[in-house]
Each structure stands twice: as C-alpha cells, then as structure tokens.
Amino acid sequence: MHERAGQVALPEDLIDVDHVIGLYYDTVPSVDDPVQKVVFGTSGHRGTSLNGSFTETHIAAIALAVAEYRRGQGIDGPLYLGRDTHALSEPAERTVIEVLVAAGVEVRVDARGSFTPTPAVSHSILLHNGARTDAGVRTSGPGIADGIVITPSHNPPADGGIKYNATDGGPAGGEVTGWIARRANELVAAGLGSITRVPYERAKDDALVVAHDFRSTYVDDLSSVIDMDAIREAGVRIGADSLGGASVEYWGLIGEQYGLNLTELHPQADPRFPFMTLDWDGKIRTDCSSPYAMASLLRTMQPGEGGQAPFDIATGNDGDSDRHGIVTPDAGLMNPNHYLAVAIDYLFRSRTGWPDSAGVGKTLVSSVLIDGVTADLGRRLIETPVGFKFFAEGLLHTTMGFGGEESAGASFLRTDGRVWTTDKDGFILDLLAAEIIAKTGKSPSAYHRELVAKHGESFYARIDAPATLEEKAALKSLSPEAVTATDLAGDPITARLVTAPGNGEPIGGLKVTTEFAWFAARPSGTEDVYKIYAESTRSAEHLAQVQDAARAVVADAIG
C-alpha cells in the first residue's frame, strides 16, 4: 500500500502531457519487443507512449487492420468513433480518422468535437442497426455499422487504449481481435510509411467524416431504460462524479433534461487528472470501484451539520464511463458484487416487460450472492470468463436481461425488454441506484443487507500479485492437472476449472472451488500482475487463509 493512497495527487504525480504526446508521434515501436506488440486483452489494446507500447504506428496499424477486417466481412456502413479524456486519446482519434478516410470508410464522430463515453458508442451502433425496430437488430447486411472507442478505461493518465466494437455493438470477440492484432503487428513491422493516410487537416473535412450527436441521441433515450420520472418526483439527491472521464459533459445535461436534483462533481476534464486521489499503489486511476481513487467522493458524502449527508446517492465513473461506483450515506462505497446482486434482484422483480426466458450473465469471478439471488428469482445463471464481450450476444438477443462483471461494469435491457447497450454502461447503473431509492425507499446498501439476511453472508476480495510475462503466459495456459493440491484452506478441493460453465470458453487462468470457498487467478492484460479473486462463506479470516493458499497454489502451478 502506498503511503499516500487516498490522498489528492501532488504536482510531482502528474504527467507532462506534451512529453507523453510527443513520444506518441516520435517513438518507432518494434514487434520484436513483446512490450511493444499489439495485444488485445479483454477490452482492446492498451499501452503507453512512455515505453513505446502505444504510438502513432500502433494506432495507424490497428485502424487499417480494422478497415481490412470490415472489407473482408462485407461491413460497409459507418463506423462510430468515440474517445475519452486521456491525453493520448485525441492524437489517436486523429490517426484513426486519417487512416479510415484513406481506406474509404465513413466515420461518424462526435458533433461537438469532444468526448464520447463507451455506452454512447454502443447505443448509437445498435440504433443504426435497428435496436428500436420491430424487426430487431441486424448484425450483417448492407449498411451495417460498427465502432471504435479510444480509451484505456480506468488506467493511469499516461496510458492509451483502443477497442473495436463489432456490429452487435459490444466488444469484438477473441477471434476477431486476434485477427486484427496479427494483421496490425504485420503492419507495425512494415513501418508507418507503409500505411496510406490522408493528413488530418484534409481528412476532417472529407465527406466521409460525418458529425453525429452521440450525447443527445443517448440522453434523449434514457427514459426507455430508467424510470427518470420516479427519480425526479422523489427528489432523490444525486452527486455524480465523472472523475474527469468522458461522462463529464453528460451528467449536467442528464440532470437538466430530466429535472433531476443532480449535482455534478468535478465538472472538468484535465488529462493530468490533478483532482484525483492516488490509488492503492500511488498511481492515478479513475477506478470507481477503488476506495482510494474514490476517496474525495467518500469524504464528500460525510454527514454535515444535523448529521445528514449532502446526497442520497453519490456515483462515480471511470475514464470512458463504462463502469460505475455507488456510494451510499450508510455504507460508503459499495463492493461492486454487492451492488450487482442488488441491481439483479430489483430489476428482475420490477421489469415486468422483460422476457420470461431472460437469464442473468455474470463472470465466474463474481460473488456467490449473485447465484443465490438468481436462483431465488427462478432465472437461469450464465457464468462466463472475464470480458464483457461474452455478454454482448445474450443482451442483443435478450436471452440475458442483465450482464455484469465483478469490476463494476454492467448493462441491462430497456424497460420493454429490448436491447439497450451491449457494452458496459456506467450511467444506467448509477441512475438505477437512484431509481431503487425512489421506488423502494431504501438505499442500495440497505437493500443489500436484506439480500444477505435472506441468502447468507460471504466475504469477497480481489488482490494483485506481481508477475513476469512468462508467468502470466504460464497462468493463462494452465490445465486443471497443473493443480496438484488436494485441499484449499483446510477444505477438500471440489473443482478445478479452466473453462467457464456458462459457455465453455477458456477463462484465461484458473478457478478452484471447495464447499465453502473459491479462488480464481488470471493474468492482467495491461499490467505486470496477476489477479487473485477469492470468496469465503465462512469469515473474513477464512478469506485471508484462502488468499494465502491461492498464492501458493498458483506459484506451484506456474513453477
């Protein structure tokens, strides 16, 4: 734990924006260096210009690879392009436009020339492809659309990221991103000069670059997925903190348009994120599930004179607004798993227009409380590997009413049972917390306590451990037989999983279960660590024992 975790960043913690952008243009990457190769993780390619893993060459190569993939698949409609507030996002957006215009691709960009959250991009793709028509959403055929979002999500200010959203509106699957990454690395090896581009000053005025009002299109449609009238009529006091991310220009309009009692906190964008508090390791991250990154908002929610907190609910979002953070006066920052369970229980009991066949999608590293809630609702549980791409098809075809990740990312259907977004949506999860208060009179944390009383308490945590590239690769390719241990924290091991029960897909790591606990370990796609998720139904002390045992099991398995 860093000694200043949870404290506001100091000048020496901030990036030199000009230096970071300069390296983006000046660095020539080498695919012989594993760090500088194009690698698509659970949600796109991420890196930083500081070590040559996110440069103009990378982005031009990825953009051309996407254009070639589209051509090969017969995708001839517009590509919806969004970006967040990180320093490298605007230069990368310019590069993408230069390449796509040269490739003859129609690019739809923000009409305000500003930031576009991930859910707004997914929403616009789906609307274009027919999300509000009786005929349903098309994913192929003439004029079909897809998209790119330029964002490293919650990563530090010097990082950049780019992800491809397929014609289903969600993050592209591994087969697609694998092809794009392989082709992009070929182009990186050939050099930037091998990629045809139109200079940005000409490209931005080309007829292929079309202004699109992502913000109004998204905000105008929110009442089809959230009961905005109930929130307004109940006068729920909302404090919405963008944490300097892409939601910064959306929350004010949402509050104004729907007449909400909403206060926008940190209503400014600065690529240095100087208003942020440091995360657990001393880095700046817009991780709205971290109590250290959310420390300012937590302090804001402290009761004032008269013992009343300033808001009934406070919310946070990450860099591209696809994640949510929920802060209540009575419990502080909610564990993402706890809020997911609340959201699932409330939605399936209140959304009478949802299909009876719609199930619950969860990652296999999410809490067992979700299992209990889903069983009590009489709904089907669909466990997948980590990655929202595994929920896209289910949400699109409404075989899932809700899909959620343990890292505070989720989406769900419109009130009438049609698809809303097939990528994570921090806005609607934040607003749902206000709707729960308006409709039930209970905070989400009070609702969670009722679920615990009904289904039992569990103790959940995620920790990170250092790992080399070789160790990460070994962990990702483990077989069940690699685990030789027969017990975990004193209990017999009942299962060793390397594929997800819900869809049979590789989990990119390992999950070990006992009657009273489980742990899962998987390598990070963006940092030199592996993640250990663990949960115990016994006690916090038992959870700590499970975590210690998990480290030993993983260390033994990967050698």
Image (cartoon, helix red, strand yellow):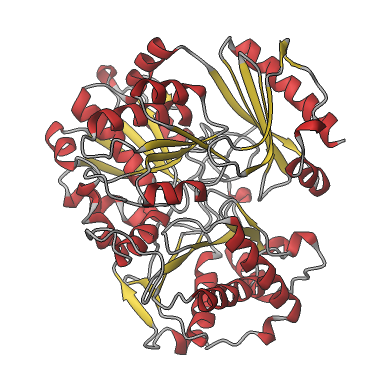
Left or right, 521 with reference to 317? right
Is residue 381 among what the camera can see? yes
Is residue 333 among what the camera can see? no
Residue nearest the observer in this picture, 348 or 103:
348
Residue depicted at x 49% and y 84%: 200
Q: Where is residue 552 in the image (x, y as percent from the top left)?
A: 80, 25
Q: Is residue 524 above or below residue 443?
A: below
Quadrant in which the N terminus is drawn: top right
Residue nearest the observer in this picture, 307 or 80:
80
Quadrant of the rendered image containing residue 129: bottom left
Residue nearest the observer in this picture, 340 or 193:
340
Residue depicted at x 39% and y 76%: 77
Quadrant in which the C terminus is drawn: top right
Q: Position of residue 67 (x, y in %)?
A: 53, 77
Residue depicted at x 65% and y 26%: 519
Q: Position of residue 162 (x, y in %)?
A: 55, 62
Q: Is residue 28 above or below residue 516?
A: below
Quadrant of the rendered image containing residue 379: top left
Left or right, 49 with reference to 307? right
